[in-house]
Amino acid sequence: MTTWTTSPTHPGEPDAAILLREYLTEMVTRYHRRPERPGEVEAALAEFPGDDLTPPTGLLLLAHRDGELAGCAGLRWRPDWAELTQVYVRRPFRGQGGGAALLAAVERRAREAGADRIRLDTRDDLVEARALYARHGYVEIAPYNDGRYAEHWFEKALPAELTTPDRRGK
């Protein structure tokens, strides 16, 4: 039986750094519809370092499938809500429930932290991601930020009965 597990980590840990680089490499190549050019991924890493995906400002989860490093997802804490970011599943593990496992894990963590909803932004070309979010109850909303690459904004309300007191110290 296939088992997906998730665990928090620091973005600077070797496995996290590998996945965040892979994620941004895919974002660069898909956005430009061509192979990456020298320095583009490094520039993306500088623009989106993920340093805030650590307590108290956020968290980064790694996903493993049967013990193999398979993906990641981040949350940034906002007042009363959480922002989902950097959701990534490695190619060999796609279509095997990794996206769903990551969403379930971040939603549980967000509820435990006191968030009443999760928001995210994404791009036109990330059609698989948009389909994943829609399948899991995320609905398109009006823009909540002016991110340079944001073209679609989603939100999912977290059930109030499952929301617990804020554990972020607020």
Image (tube, rainbow, N blue to C red):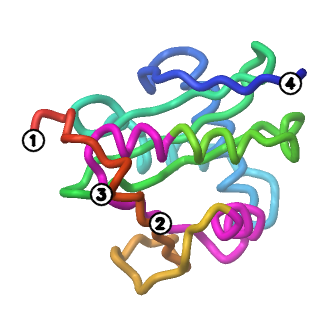
Q: What element carries label 3?
A: strand
The residue at which mark 2 appears reads as 156
The residue at which mark 3 appears reads as 81
Query: Looking at the image, which residue is at 39% across and 56% down?
Result: 83
Q: Distance between the residues labelled 1 and 2?
A: 22 Å
The residue at which mark 1 appears reads as 170
* Residue 140 covered by magenta stretch: no
Q: Would residue 63 be found to the left or right of residue 142 on screen?
A: right
Q: Pointer 3: residues within 10 angstroms few (<14), some, or many (20+)?
A: many
Q: What stretch is highlighted in magenta?
A: 106-135
Q: Position of residue 41 (x, y in %)?
A: 60, 44
Mark 3: which amino acid? Answer: Trp
Query: Looking at the image, which residue is at 69% across and 47% down?
Result: 100
Determine whether 28 is above or below 165 in the image.
Answer: below
Query: Mark 1–mark 2 contact, CB under 8 Å?
Result: no
Q: Distance between the residues labelled 4 and 1?
A: 38 Å
Q: Position of residue 166 (x, y in %)?
A: 19, 40
Determine whether 63 is above or below 131 in the image.
Answer: above
Q: Is mark 2 on a helix, strand or loop?
A: strand
First in residue order: circle 1 vs circle 3 = 3
Q: Distance between the residues labelled 3 and 2?
A: 10 Å
Query: Mark 4–mark 3 contact, CB under 8 Å?
Result: no
Mark 4: which amino acid? Answer: Thr
Q: How far apart are marks 1 and 3 (CA)?
A: 12 Å
Q: Pointer 2: residues within 10 angstroms few (<14), some, or many (20+)?
A: many
Q: Is mark 1 on a helix, strand or loop?
A: loop
